[in-house]
Image: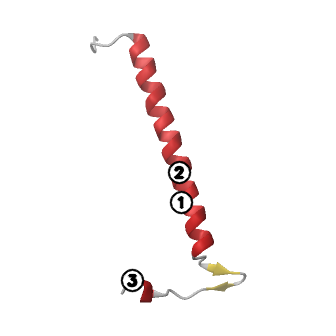
């Protein structure tokens, strides 16, 4: 089944897609860590109540 691109072009596109996915995963992990450092939901054994004032 012909797709109109060569195997080398397909490999390059695949490599770029995988690199983009890896970047997005690590960027989101970094964002989650930064948010956790900013507003942790658990303080030791005690869960912090939601503070909805920041959304008003």
The quarter holding residue 30 reads bottom right
| Residue at 56 percent of width and 48 percent of height | 26
| First in sequence: mark 3 vs mark 1 | 1
Tell me if 40 is positioned left or right of 9 in this view.
right
- In contact (CB < 8 Å): disc 2 and disc 1: yes
Q: Position of residue 10 (x, y in %)?
A: 40, 18
Identify the residue at image location x=45%, y=18%: 11
**Circle 3 is placed at which residue position?**
55
At label 1, counting other C-alpha atoms closer than 10 Å, the crowd grade (few under 14, some 14-19, many 20 or more) is few
In the rendered image, which quarter contains the N terminus?
top left
Measuring 43% from the left and 32% from the top, which residue is drawn there?
17
Colour scheme of the rendered structure: secondary structure
Q: Which residue is mark 1?
A: 31
In this picture, is 52 found above or below 29? below
- Which callout, 3 or 2, points at the residue further toward the start of the chain? 2
User: Residue at 36% across / 87% down in the picture?
Assistant: 56
User: Which image quarter: residue 35?
Assistant: bottom right
Q: Nearer the viewer, residue 38 or 46?
A: 38
Classed neighbour count for the residue bearing mark 3: other residues with Cα under 10 Å, few (<14), some (14–19), many (≥20): few
Q: Which residue is mark 2?
A: 27
Q: Estimate the x, y position of residue 6 in percent, counting from the top left.
A: 36, 10
The answer for how far apart the CA atoms under marks 3 and 2 are is: 24 Å
Is disc 3 placed on a helix, strand or loop?
A: helix
Q: CA distance from mark 2 to mark 1?
A: 6 Å
Q: Is residue 15 left or right of residue 56?
A: right
| Label 2 residue SS | helix
Quadrant position of residue 13:
top left
Give the vertical position of 47 relative to 29 (above or below).
below
């Amino acid at each position: 089944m012909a797709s109109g691109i060569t195997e080398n072009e397909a490999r390059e596109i695949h490599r770029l897609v995988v690199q983009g996915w890896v970047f997005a995963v690590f960027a989101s992990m970094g964002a989650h860590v930064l948010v956790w450092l900013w507003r942790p939901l658990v303080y030791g054994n005690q869960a912090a109540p939601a503070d909805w004032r920041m959304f008003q």
